[in-house]
């Protein structure tokens, strides 16, 4: 967003609708050469937001690019967009089981969900591939 603010990237519709307070706007008007005020606003706005869900990820990307994110990512990965987003959702669901449910199966036996090195390795590989595809899509489609 800072690059768009500087004029080095296209300003998307979502970028142009990003809300700032009058206090921020006045600071920006007075300090024409500075950009710390917008950097601070962006960080404050996103500080507590989670960018795990595919919908939230595409929402964030629309701040800097108008690409059709998951179609572009799917094409780069050789997969259907829905397949990529479902894979990501499965990884996020598994992460949430670990983080929010102590990784326990809800049963009277208090068992842990199964996990092995291969499952972890596959999840890490998938997240890396998705992240690289997102990066490539954004960089090649300013």
Image (cartoon, rainbow, N blue to C red):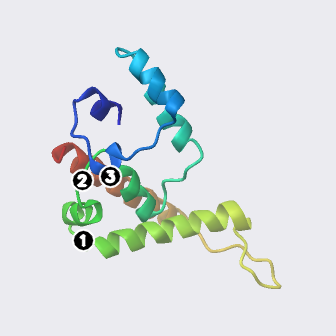
Name the mark nearer the viewer: 3 or 1: 3
Q: Position of residue 81 (x, y in %)?
A: 28, 71
Of 142 and 133, which appears nearest the observer? 142
Q: Which residue is mark 2?
A: 66
Q: Is residue 63 at least partly visible in the picture?
A: no
- CB under 8 Å between discs 2 and 1: no
Instruction: Point out the image quarter for the C terminus.
Output: top left
Residue 53, position as x, y percentages in the image? 47, 63
Residue for point 72% across, 68% down: 101
Mark toward the start of the polypeptide (3 vs 1)? 3
Q: Evaluate if marks 2 and 3 touch, with contact meaning CB atoms under 8 Å apart.
A: yes
Q: Is residue 119 above or below residue 129?
A: below
Compute the Cα span from label 2 to label 3: 5 Å
Mark 3 nearby-residue class (10 Å; few <14, some 14–19, many ≥20): some
Name the residue beneath numbered marker 1: 79
- In the displayed structure image, the side of residue 64 where residue 55 appears, left or right: right
For mark 3, what is the residue? 62
Q: Position of residue 76 (x, y in %)?
A: 20, 60
Q: Residues within 10 Å of mark 2 (few under 14, many from 20)?
A: some
Q: Secondary structure at mark 3?
A: loop
């Amino acid at each position: 967003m800072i690059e768009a603010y500087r004029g080095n990237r296209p300003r998307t519709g979502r970028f142009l609708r990003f809300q700032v307070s009058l206090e921020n706007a006045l600071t920006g008007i007075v300090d024409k050469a500075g950009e710390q005020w917008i950097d601070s606003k962006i960080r404050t706005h996103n500080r507590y937001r989670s960018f795990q869900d595919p919908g939230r990820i595409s929402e964030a990307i629309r701040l800097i690019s108008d690409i059709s994110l998951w179609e572009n990512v799917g094409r780069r990965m050789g997969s259907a967009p829905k397949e990529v987003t479902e894979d990501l959702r499965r990884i996020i669901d598994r992460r949430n089981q670990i983080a929010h449910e102590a990784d326990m199966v809800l049963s009277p036996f208090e068992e842990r969900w199964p996990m092995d090195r291969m499952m972890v390795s596959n999840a890490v590989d998938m997240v890396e591939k998705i992240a690289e595809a997102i990066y490539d899509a954004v960089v090649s489609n300013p």
